[in-house]
Structure formats: C-alpha cells, structure tokens
Image: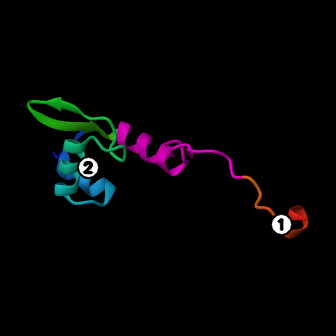
Amino acid sequence: MSEESEVVKVDGLAKMLGRTEASIREGIRRGVDWLPQSFKMGGKHCWLKDDVRKFLREFRDGEHALPKVGRKRKTPPTLRNVA
C-alpha cells in the first residue's frame, strides 16, 4: 500500500513548480522569493504540500507582488502650458 507523503523534497517541488531540480537548488542557495519557505529534515530541504499549495495560491492572487518604487509620474508638459 503506497501512502503519499505530505513532505515534499527538491525533486517533488520541482515537479509542482514546473522547474528543474537545479533551478530549485540554485534558488535555495540564493534565497529567491519565488520559492516557498523550506525547513531542513535530516540535512535535506523539505516543504509541506499544504504550504506549497498555499504559496502558489497567494502567488496567483498577486499577494507576493513587489510594490512599485520611485516617485509618482507627473503629466508631461504640453505646448499649451509652455506659452
């Protein structure tokens, strides 16, 4: 009887996100924001399936979007305003 685990390792996360294992490992190394929060179990990075699904729903809904930085744009001058 095969029981599906609630813990996902790098290879499972790569399949869930549609990326390669190498890109997941590089993302872990660099600390990118497109990866859900992981934890270490036995020296390996792991994720809970529920956490990954929640992270993907939040990403889909735009909750992970970075705020725009910089000043608000002013309307450009027109010839009517110059004279």
Q: Which residue lies furthest to the front in this view?
A: 83
Q: Where is residue 9 in the image (x, y as percent from the top left)?
A: 19, 43
Residue appearing at x 85%, y 69% in the figure = 79
Q: Residue at x 69, y 52 (%)?
A: 73
Dot 2 crowding, Cα within 10 Å, few <14, some 14–19, many 20+: many
| Number of disc labels | 2
Q: Residue at x 37, y 38 (%)?
A: 50
Type of amino acid under label 2: Leu
**Which residue lies most toward the bottom here?**
79
What x and y, as percent, mark residue 59?
Answer: 47, 47
Q: Residue 78 shows which numbered tag?
A: 1
**Residue that label 2 marks:** 13
Magenta span contains residue 53? yes
- Amino acid at pointer 1: Thr
Q: Depth check: 49 or 44 in front?
A: 44
Residue lying furthest left: 42
Percent x, y for residue 80?
90, 67
Q: In which quarter of the image is the C terminus?
A: bottom right
On screen, residue 9 versus residue 68, left or right, reads left
Instruction: Pick whichever, 71 or 56, lies toward us.
Output: 71
Secondary structure at badge 1 equals loop
Q: Is 43 placed above or below 63 here?
A: above
Q: Check the picture and name the quadrant holding the N terminus.
A: top left
Q: Give the range drawn in magenta.
A: 50-73
Sequence-first disc among 2 and 1: 2
Instruction: Mark 2 vs mark 1: give the one in front.
Output: 1
Residue 81, image quadrant: bottom right
| CA distance separating discs 2 and 1 | 53 Å
Q: Going by the image, does 12 lie left or right of 73?
A: left
Q: Where is residue 14 drawn, in percent x and y?
A: 24, 54
